[in-house]
């Protein structure tokens, strides 16, 4: 499962955000082999295509893709040296696919800021440095284990690549106040420069908590009130897909309509591994049609008579939103 680790300074709103995420937590029974502890939550990736396809096919089940989020304690200067509990927690996120870096933008005298002033650029630098220092330590540990294999020699030695935190893709989460949100707060040029082209979302974590607890109607009212088109969490989940260069393809039938994850540019046999690992080898051909084209056709039979379903071979590159039927 795709996983995202949440990092940031203390008191920036990480756990508030995580709480909102876990309110969206999926029914874990659908997702075997996931142990969920209080700091790890699996959430479904919202996808209206699954909903519409399920209606189209009268599916008994709908299954979305999932992302796992991991909440760790706030990092402070020196965390990598074992200051505070940070070091231990950093080990918990060494294997994540991406990092969500929560940056405090909201001002509130009642909520202590560890640097006692709101300075997003400085805060970002502190966290980045801590991640780099933690990586240095990982490298040193490896050298100590086997001094002959210094980092230079690693390539030839056939050791597995080190999972370095600084190499991971980062999505910045700017945690603004509700007032800032209502005024459409956006990072300025300097701040954009500091995040160097990374994806980002602007949200208010207490508002996200409210949204995650609200019913659908109430949720729509909140969104209208703050003049936003989707919840920040939904945006964050989608950005996660974008940041990691992933795409979603779909299958649909009476049993279930389901979303699957593949990498942009994957050939269809490779993408079909998501469904079953043997499919990559056994793949012969597939029917593929864009989900919207299928819905507009009204039925599979109609889509077929109009020649809208492509018969594709092993050289087909899977596309975002493809509905496929794989033949092995
Ligand atoms: N005013 C305001 N308070 C917030 C916001 N987000 C979080 N808080 C408050 O800040 C405090 C800390 O929030 P948490 O979500 O626990 O912060 P954290 O980043 O998990 O902190 P650590 O786990 O200590 O690193 C809580 O009292 C929250 O209610 C916000 O956007 N605005
Ligand atoms: Mg916390």
Image (cartoon, helix red, strand yellow):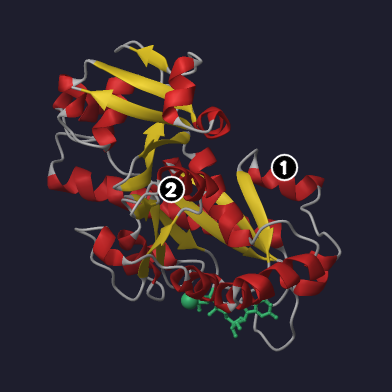
| Total number of numbered discs in the rendering | 2
**Residue 146 as seen in the image, left or right of residue 315:** left
- Front residue of 9 and 129: 9
- Report if residue 250 is visible in the image: yes
Residue 266 location (% of width, % of height): 37, 23
- Name the residue that disc number 2 marks: 54
Q: Is residue 138 above or below residue 156?
A: below
Q: Could you tell me which residue is drawn at 54 percent across and 57 percent down? A: 101
Residue positioned 67% across, 72% down in the render: 217
Percent across and percent down for residue 282 are 15, 21
Which secondary structure, mark 1?
Answer: helix
Q: Determine which quarter of the picture holds residue 229.
A: bottom right
Q: Residues within 10 Å of mark 1 (few under 14, many from 20)?
A: few
Along the line of sight, which residue is nearer the eye, 127 or 243? 243
For image coordinates 41% across by 72% down, the residue present is 83
Q: Earlier in the sequence, mark 1 or mark 2?
A: 2
Residue wearing tag 1: 193
What is the x, y in percent for residue 197? 65, 38
């Amino acid at each position: 499962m795709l996983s995202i680790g949440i990092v940031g300074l203390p008191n920036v709103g990480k756990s508030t955000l995580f709480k909102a995420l876990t309110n969206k937590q999926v029914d874990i029974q659908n997702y075997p082999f996931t142990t969920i502890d209080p700091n790890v939550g699996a959430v479904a990736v919202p996808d209206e295509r699954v909903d519409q396809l399920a209606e189209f096919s009268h599916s008994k089940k709908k299954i979305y893709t999932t992302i796992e989020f991991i909440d760790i304690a706030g990092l402070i200067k020196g965390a990598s040296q074992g200051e505070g509990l940070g070091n231990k927690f950093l080990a918990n996120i060494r294997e994540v696919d991406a990092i969500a870096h929560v940056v405090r933008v909201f001002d509130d005298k009642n909520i202590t800021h560890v640097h006692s002033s709101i300075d997003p650029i400085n805060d970002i630098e502190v966290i980045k440095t801590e991640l780099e220092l933690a990586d240095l330590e990982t490298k040193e540990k490896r050298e100590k284990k086997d001094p002959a294999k210094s980092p230079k020699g690693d390539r030839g030695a056939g050791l597995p690549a080190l999972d370095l935190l600084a190499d991971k893709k980062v999505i910045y989460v700017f945690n603004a106040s509700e007032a800032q949100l209502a005024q459409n707060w956006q990072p300025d040029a300097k701040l954009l420069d500091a995040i160097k082209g990374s994806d980002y979302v602007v949200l208010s974590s207490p508002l996200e908590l409210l949204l995650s607890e609200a019913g659908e109607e109430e949720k729509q009212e909140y969104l209208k009130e703050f003049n936003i088109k989707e919840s920040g969490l939904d945006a964050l989940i989608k950005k996660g897909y974008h940041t990691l260069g992933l795409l979603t393809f779909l299958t649909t039938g009476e049993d279930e309509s389901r979303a699957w994850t593949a990498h942009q540019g994957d050939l269809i046999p490779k993408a079909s591994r998501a469904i079953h690992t043997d499919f990559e080898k056994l793949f012969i051909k597939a029917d593929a049609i864009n989900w919207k084209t299928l819905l507009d056709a009204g039925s599979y039979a109609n889509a077929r008579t109009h020649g809208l379903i492509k018969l594709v071979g092993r050289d087909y590159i899977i596309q975002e939103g493809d509905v496929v039927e794989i033949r092995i």
